[in-house]
Structures are given as structure tokens and as C-alpha cells.
Image: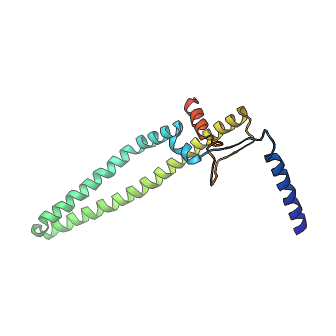
Amino acid sequence: MKSIFKLSTAILFVFVFSVCHADDFRIGVVDTERILRESAPAVQAEKKIEKEFELRDQEMKKISRQAREIQMYFDKEGMTLLDAEHRSKERELANLNVTLQRMQREFREDLNLRKNEELALVLARANKAIKAIAESERYDLILQEAVYRNPKIDITDKVLQYLSTEK
């Protein structure tokens, strides 16, 4: 079994080596992170998400302000408050803090979910762009993840340009 694996591995290496040395073999590399940061669809998605979550963010800021105001009231008037009023304000402050923490947790979860949805759409569009560039410029192999990429084979700028002109 080991000999069959070694033989097939050797044949694969010989094939890859011969293909790589062919004069017309073209390789390209794309920086996916840069596509997700700089491409027109990614920027549009980020703006869309910001707008979508703006009202919730304002609501959380409003509750946070209310909690700060009650805390400042406590700091200023805490010693002169009647026990009933003191307990009432403490309860109100605790409820605001619980509500705020819940809202923040839900906000983060929903925001991450929406970002992942939008980034998946951006990646799908980027993959279509990469495929179109590969076919039109006759690339044999395009990699999206690489530890090192030579700027000569980096086609990220072409993909960004394609995505900015795509409708």
C-alpha cells in the first residue's frame, strides 16, 4: 500500500513539475482580505450594514446615557435620598444595565451575522470576477490564499478593478 502511495505521489510531482515548466503556464494570486476591505461591493455592504444598525446603536447610546445620569444622580444625591427612593433608583439602574447588556449582546450577534452574510455575497462576486479574469487572460491557476505572493503574479488590483466596473 505504501509503495502505491509513493508511486502515485512521485507521478503527481513529475506531472506538476512538467506542467509548471511549460512556457505558457500562468499563475495568479489574489489577496482575499484586501478584496473584502477595498472592493466596491465590500464598501457598499459596510455602508448598508452601518445604516441598517444605526437606529439600534442610537437606542443603546440613549439607554447608556440614562444609566450614566442615574449613576451621577446617585453620586451627587445618594446620601440625602430616602430609602424607598434609593431602592427605586437602584432597581431602575440595575434594570437599565441588564437591558443594555442584553441589547449589546444581541446587537453584536446580529451585526456579526449580517456581516458574514454580506461578506459571503462579496466573496461570491469576487469569485465570479476571478473566474472571468482567469478565462479572459488564460490563467491556468489562481490561488486566493498564499503565505507569500510575488507582486508579479498578484492580480488583486485586476479583481478590484473588475468589481468596481461590474454592475
Q: Nearer the viewer, residue 47 or 103?
A: 47
Q: Horizontal placement of 118 versus 71: left or right?
A: right
Res 164 quadrant in image:
top right
Residue at point 30%, 51% (across, down): 61
Q: Is residue 23 visible?
A: yes
Question: Residue 65 appears at what percent x and percent y?
Answer: 25, 54
Say how the picture is coloured.
rainbow
Residue at point 16%, 65% (across, down): 75
In the picture, the quarter occupied by the C terminus is top right
Q: Nearer the viewer, residue 104 or 41?
A: 41
Question: Residue 144 appears at what percent x and percent y?
Answer: 64, 47
In the picture, the quarter occupied by the N terminus is bottom right
Residue at point 77%, 41% (across, down): 25
Residue at point 60%, 33% (across, down): 162
Question: Residue 15 appears at what percent x and percent y?
Answer: 85, 51
Q: Is residue 1 visible?
A: no
In the image, residue 106 above or below residue 24? below
Q: Horizontal placement of 120 versus 103: left or right?
A: right
Q: Horizontal placement of 155 versus 52: left or right?
A: right
Question: Residue 4 appears at what percent x and percent y?
Answer: 90, 64
In the image, residue 118 above or below residue 12? above
- Judged from this view, the residue extending furthest toward the left is 80
Res 131 quadrant in image:
top right
How many marks do you count on the picture?
0
